[in-house]
Image: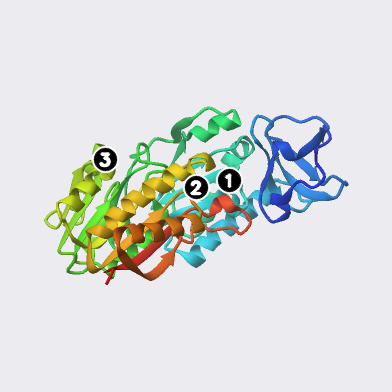
């Protein structure tokens, strides 16, 4: 049996893991002692030999080591994986509606590089790192066993490891069944709204579970009101407005596939008479609506991430500013605006400043109702900055008088 390799950090490096994070970057490493295969578990030491824990290595990735444990004596074995998986499932049972939820959220559940979503009796897994890819079968086995004990029988697992980021790990993008094939259109119920989730071809793992309680928060503002839902995707905010009793709802999205699914979801909920969807480029449509003098009681802005790197933050800020200026102008005096960013790189301070600038440009005053983040099944692990990405504001919009 070969001796475990040791990764030694440079003096003054390792600030992320010393603060509680999980990543060690290639430029933080002084040397690697011993033999290893990519994906192996290695020991990590500070520059002076102080043991810092154990994680899996991949020198093909800029994130060279992802920490699995801070205990240098802890073996990353079957029992260890079972404890991690059971702790993740127990946390969901304690904090969220578990009918459909994110069961494992990578680093925030101390299983770096893997995401598992549960849609009723189907699991969808996304694996983004070589080391966790090797542990994936064991993680899924232990998860199915834990769910079984609570009476949840999983009828199928689908893998959506088709994100481009896998290529940075030297991994091929992949999607397909794990085990027997099954119908990949899964009906779920969230906040009283029914959806058909396409786990094979939908975005990410099929549905944006992270906005669950933000959608619920909007329900109380929508009864009897005219609502505009921008970047509606498969209609989730629009349908929450409809189910709450909105008088009229319009959802806009550039994707014909998404709008087709949104219309089916409206029909599924008996809302086709009040909730309508149109295929359109929202960035082009909003200024035209402002120019036409359109007004709504409630406007919801849920755009895709305008930036996926630090290099494009300025460009992204401009995009957020443009849609928020328009969104504010489309809200009737005393009406409501929900606006959010799902980009980790568009941090809280920058996003908040963009909204403030937008209000000045639109000559509106904002009264903050609440600030929210992602649902608790996407936990924010302090010191693991990548786990905090969703910022969600709800405002009352007032004319500047």
**How dense is the environment of label 1, judged by Cα within 10 Å: few (below 14), some, or many (20 and up)?**
many
Identity of the residue furthest to the left in this view: 273
Q: Earlier in the sequence, mark 2 or mark 1?
A: 2
Q: Which residue is mark 1?
A: 139
- Can residue 188 be seen here? no
Residue in the picture at 31% in, 55% down: 325
Relative placement, left or right, of 9 versus 348 is: right
Q: Earlier in the sequence, mark 2 or mark 3?
A: 2
Relative placement, left or right, of 39 versus 295 is: right
**How dense is the environment of label 3, judged by Cα within 10 Å: few (below 14), some, or many (20 and up)?**
some
Of the residues tagged 3 and 1, which is closer to the observer?
Answer: 3
Q: Are marks 3 and 1 in contact (CB under 8 Å)?
A: no
Residue 30, x across and y down, in percent: 80, 37
Q: Which residue is mark 3?
A: 254
Residue 134, x across and y down, in percent: 62, 36
Q: Are marks 2 and 1 in contact (CB under 8 Å)?
A: yes
Of the residues tagged 2 and 3, which is closer to the observer?
Answer: 3
User: Splitting the image into 4 quarters, where does residue 55 fall?
Assistant: top right
> What colour scheme was applied to this rendering of the protein?
rainbow
Q: State the CA–CA distance, disc 2 to disc 1.
A: 10 Å
Q: State the CA–CA distance, disc 3 to disc 1.
A: 37 Å
Of the residues tagged 2 and 1, which is closer to the observer?
Answer: 2
Taking depth in this image into account, of 43 and 2 the one nearest to the observer is 43
Q: Which residue is mark 2?
A: 116
């Amino acid at each position: 049996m070969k001796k475990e390799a040791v990764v030694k950090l440079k003096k003054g490096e390792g600030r992320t893991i010393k603060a509680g994070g999980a990543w060690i970057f290639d430029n933080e490493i002084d040397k690697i002692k011993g033999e290893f295969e990519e994906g192996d578990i290695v020991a990590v030491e500070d520059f002076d030999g102080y043991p810092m824990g154990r994680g899996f290595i991949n020198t093909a990735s800029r994130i060279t080591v992802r920490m699995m444990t801070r205990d240098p004596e802890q073996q990353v074995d079957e029992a260890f994986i079972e404890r991690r998986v059971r702790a993740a499932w127990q946390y969901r049972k304690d904090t969220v509606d578990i009918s459909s939820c994110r069961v494992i959220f990578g680093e925030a559940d101390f299983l770096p590089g893997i995401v598992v979503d549960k849609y009723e009796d189907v699991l969808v897994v996304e694996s983004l790192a070589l080391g966790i890819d090797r542990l994936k079968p064991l993680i899924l086995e232990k998860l199915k066993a834990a769910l079984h004990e609570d009476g949840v029988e999983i009828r199928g697992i689908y893998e959506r490891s088709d994100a481009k980021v896998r290529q940075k790990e030297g991994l091929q993008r992949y999607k397909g069944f794990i085990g027997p094939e099954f119908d990949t259109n899964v009906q779920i119920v969230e906040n009283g709204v029914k959806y058909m989730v396409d786990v094979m071809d939908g975005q990410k793992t099929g549905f944006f579970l992270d906005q669950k309680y933000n959608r619920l928060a909007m329900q109380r503002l929508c009864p009897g009101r005219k609502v505009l839902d921008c970047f509606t995707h498969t209609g989730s905010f629009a349908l929450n407005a409809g189910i709450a009793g909105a008088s009229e709802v319009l959802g806009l999205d550039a994707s014909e596939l998404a709008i087709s699914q949104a219309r089916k979801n409206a029909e599924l909920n008996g809302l086709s008479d009040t909730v309508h969807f149109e295929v359109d480029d929202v960035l082009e449509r909003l200024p035209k609506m402002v120019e036409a003098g359109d007004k709504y009681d409630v406007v919801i802005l849920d755009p895709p991430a305008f930036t996926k790197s630090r290099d494009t933050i300025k460009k992204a800020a401009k995009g957020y500013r443009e849609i928020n200026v328009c969104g504010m102008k489309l809200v009737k005096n005393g009406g409501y605006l929900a606006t959010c960013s799902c980009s980790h790189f568009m941090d809280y301070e920058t996003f908040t400043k963009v909204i403030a600038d937008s209000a000045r440009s639109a000559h509106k005053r904002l009264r903050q109702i609440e600030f929210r983040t992602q649902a608790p099944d996407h936990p924010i692990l302090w010191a693991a900055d990548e786990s905090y990405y969703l910022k969600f504001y709800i405002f009352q919009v007032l004319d500047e008088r």
